[in-house]
């Protein structure tokens, strides 16, 4: 089976990382993740990242660099993470789809939330990109 990419956004602002609390599906509800979603056929990961952030958070974002590594999700999906930032004039992020709360976390607060297991190694890789 062909591997399918799920993009995660390390949305960074002033040295803080945006975390999103899942509201669905039930088995993931209450856990935190990097926002994002599946790359659709014919779509680049960067384009998927911009689309997913618009759909899930209502923001205009600009992808940055890919965070090294990829992490297995349920077959056939793998998580790849890109840094991203809000475009000038973008709305503030809001939990529009599949999330019920958002938090901007400083490096000291990163582990204050219960991350989804598959996001933990990705978040560890993101920490050096917070620019502090």
Image (spheres, rainbow, N blue to C red):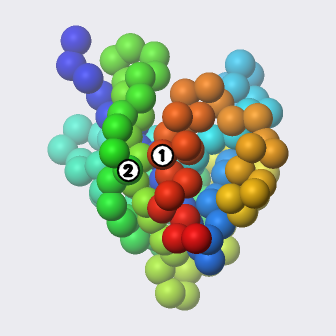
Marks counted in the figure total 2
Q: Residue at x 34, y 38 (%)?
A: 69
Name the element at disc 2. Answer: strand
Q: Quadrant of the N terminus?
A: top left
Residue designated by label 1: 125
Q: Residue at x 34, y 45 (%)?
A: 68
Considering every residue shown, the one lying at the far bottom of the view is: 89
Q: Which is more N-terminal, label 1 or label 2?
A: 2
* Quarter of image, res 31: top right
Crowdedness near tag 2: few (<14), some (14–19) or many (≥20) residues, C-alpha within 10 Å? some
* Quarter of image, res 116: top right
Q: Position of residue 5 (x, y in %)?
A: 32, 34
Q: Residue at x 72, y 63 (%)?
A: 106
Indicate whether 26 appears above or below 8: above
Between residue 87 and residue 71, name the one nearer to us. Answer: 71
Circle on res. 65: none
**Label 2 – label 1 distance at C-alpha:** 7 Å
Q: Quadrant of the C terminus?
A: bottom right
Name the element at disc 1. Answer: helix
Q: Residue at x 41, y 29 (%)?
A: 71
């Amino acid at each position: 089976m062909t591997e399918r990419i799920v993009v995660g956004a390390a949305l960074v602002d002033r040295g803080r990382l945006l975390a999103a609390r899942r509201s669905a599906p039930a088995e993931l509800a209450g856990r935190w993740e990097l926002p994002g979603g599946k790359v659709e056929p014919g779509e680049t990961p960067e384009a998927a990242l911009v689309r997913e952030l618009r759909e899930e958070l209502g923001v205009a974002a600009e992808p940055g660099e890919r965070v090294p590594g990829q992490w297995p999700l349920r077959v056939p999906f793998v998580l790849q993470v890109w840094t991203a930032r809000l475009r000038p004039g973008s709305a503030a992020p809001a939990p529009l789809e599949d999330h019920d709360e958002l938090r901007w976390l400083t490096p000291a607060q990163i582990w204050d939330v219960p991350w989804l297991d598959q996001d933990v190694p990705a978040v560890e890789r993101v920490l050096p990109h917070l620019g502090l």
